[in-house]
Amino acid sequence: MSHALFIQKCENVIVYVKEKITSVTLIDCKKVGVQLTSVVSSVDVTNCSNIDIHVSGALPSAMLGSSSSINLVLLDAE
């Protein structure tokens, strides 16, 4: 498995990923929601605003740079 999600310059979007994914990157986004099952590596958010990220499984690392109003919700998978 080596699936990565790259989202750039999106606005008013909701993304659902039901399978385990290696990494997620968001760059220059506004009002984006991302719902993930499990992440193997990391979630990176750069130059974004009003981002909601929900992870129902594992998330080893999250990097947030030059961004505002980021909501990172970690849900218990059990």
Image (cartoon, rainbow, N blue to C red):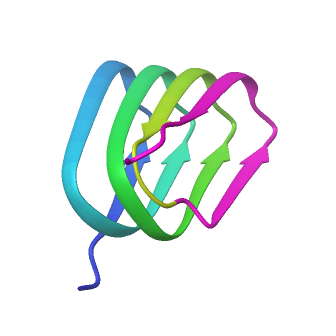
- Is residue 75 left or right of 2 when viewed as pictured? right
The image shows residue 45 at horizontal and vertical percentages of 63, 45
The image shows residue 46 at horizontal and vertical percentages of 68, 45
Residue 70 in the magenta stretch? The answer is yes
Asked whether 47 or 18 is in front, the reply is 18
Residue at figure coordinates x 50%, y 55% from the top left? 25
To which quarter of the image does residue 50 belong? top right
Asked whether 74 or 45 is in front, the reply is 74
To which quarter of the image does residue 68 belong? top right
The image shows residue 20 at horizontal and vertical percentages of 27, 65
Above or below 15: residue 71: above
The image shows residue 14 at horizontal and vertical percentages of 28, 24
Residue extending furthest front? 78
| Residue stretch rendered in magenta on the structure | 59-78
Q: Considering the image in quadrants, where does the N terminus appear?
A: bottom left
- Is residue 69 left or right of 6 when viewed as pictured? right
Residue extending furthest bottom? 1
Above or below 30: residue 43: below
